[in-house]
């Protein structure tokens, strides 16, 4: 084979630049993506992914429940609701030194973002004052900060921004037409209003949803449409596979087909090209092969640590081994590789 023939072969096999439509995304267009042959969908998603992120790049985030249980909401998936008997006991907001120790441990393990979750419907003024102190303390460690505290008023969002909050998580959970099947103590518009308040304060948005709550395929497409059509779409998009907790109304939900979950990751990547698509809850049940497909589909962030609020998560050592096997680059993996080479 001559030089020209070789160059032509390389050119033919190089992923073509895919023109990604820039919204608004219709539910029908997203459903068409979800229905694509899986290999074609993965190829498109990975091509879009490589146009916007360095090869192998992955973000490690750690999530800590700083105020656990006793939430008055009735979200059908949540073990922290006061309405359900799940064995989760209500606890007070953690002290600053406890949170700082946890954040430092997360940083030492390789995490770059530290997320603090509190089981409130909506925090009161005194709650936000205390969380602002936590944000300042974690920010002082040199980490990105994130919080999820429930519905947020505009002045609370500005107060958290002033304290140094980088991201606010507030998931849409599912499509609007299926939302009341999951929770009826608040409305979908309540969720959207909080996201607008966060945006107005200059805080980056972390917003995604949950797959496996009994929804139909059209509801999954509807969730992605809602997220992708936010203006702008979220900087961080966690896609969760339902963790079926005994005592919650959704404990007996049918497990998600792993390939359907991979499809959700891929379509999130295609429709929100520059977002961090986070492979979130449910990883413990997926296994390495399905997680690898999710990374191939464009996931480039994971929650890192042995717990997600009150449910299990793969431990740090297991994740580090998997990421190294897949050639994904986090600070922790890089440091361990350098140590082995020394």
Image (spheres, rainbow, N blue to C red):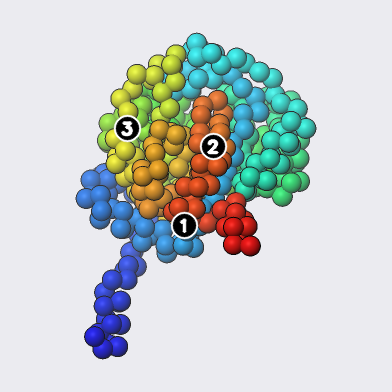
Q: Residues within 10 Å of mark 3 (few under 14, many from 20)?
A: some
To which quarter of the image does residue 339 belong? Answer: bottom right
**Residues at marks 3 and 2, CA–CA distance in whole angstroms:** 23 Å
Disc 2 on helix, strand or loop? loop
Image quarter of the N terminus: bottom left
**Residues at marks 1 and 3, CA–CA distance in whole angstroms:** 27 Å
Residue marked by disc 1: 327
Residue marked by disc 2: 315
Residue placed most toward the observer, 204 or 299: 299
Image coordinates of residue 142 in percent, x first then y, are 72, 50
Q: Residues within 10 Å of mark 1 (few under 14, many from 20)?
A: some
Disc 3 on helix, strand or loop? loop
Q: Residues within 10 Å of mark 2 (few under 14, many from 20)?
A: few
Mark 3 vs mark 2: in front? 2
Q: Is residue 152 visible?
A: no
- In the rendered view, does 336 fall on the left or right side of 233? right
User: Which residue lies at the image location 71% right of the left edge and 41% below the top edge?
Assistant: 104
């Amino acid at each position: 084979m001559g030089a020209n023939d070789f160059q032509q072969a390389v050119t033919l096999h190089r992923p073509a630049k895919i023109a990604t439509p820039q919204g608004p995304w219709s539910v029908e267009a997203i459903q068409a993506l979800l229905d694509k042959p899986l290999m074609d969908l993965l190829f498109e998603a990975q091509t879009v992914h490589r146009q916007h992120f360095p090869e192998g790049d992955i973000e490690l985030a750690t999530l800590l429940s700083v105020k656990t249980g006793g939430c008055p909401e009735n979200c059908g998936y949540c073990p922290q609701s006061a309405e359900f008997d799940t064995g989760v006991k209500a606890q007070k907001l953690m002290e600053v030194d406890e949170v700082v120790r946890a954040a430092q441990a997360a940083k030492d393990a390789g995490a770059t973002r530290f997320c603090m979750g509190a089981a409130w419907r909506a925090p009161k003024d005194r709650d936000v004052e205390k969380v602002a102190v936590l944000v300042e303390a974690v920010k002082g460690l040199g980490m990105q900060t994130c919080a999820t505290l429930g519905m947020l008023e505009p002045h609370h969002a500005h107060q958290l921004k002033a304290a140094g909050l980088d991201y606010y998580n507030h998931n849409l959970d599912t499509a609007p037409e299926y939302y009341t099947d999951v929770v009826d103590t608040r409305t979908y518009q309540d969720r959207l209003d909080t996201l607008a308040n966060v945006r107005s304060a200059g805080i980056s948005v972390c917003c995604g949803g949950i797959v496996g709550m009994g929804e139909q395929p059209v509801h999954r497409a509807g969730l992605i449409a809602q997220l992708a059509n936010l203006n702008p779409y979220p900087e961080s998009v966690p896609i969760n596979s339902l963790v079926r907790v005994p005592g919650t109304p959704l404990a007996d939900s049918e497990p998600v087909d792993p390939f359907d979950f991979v499809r959700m990751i891929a379509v999130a990547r295609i429709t929100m090209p520059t977002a961090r698509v986070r492979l979130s809850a449910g990883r413990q049940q997926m296994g390495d092969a399905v997680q690898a497909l999710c990374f191939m589909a464009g996931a480039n962030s994971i929650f890192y640590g042995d717990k997600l609020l009150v449910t299990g998560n793969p431990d740090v050592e297991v994740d580090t081994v998997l990421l190294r096997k897949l050639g994904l680059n986090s600070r922790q993996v890089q440091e361990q590789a350098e140590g082995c080479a020394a």
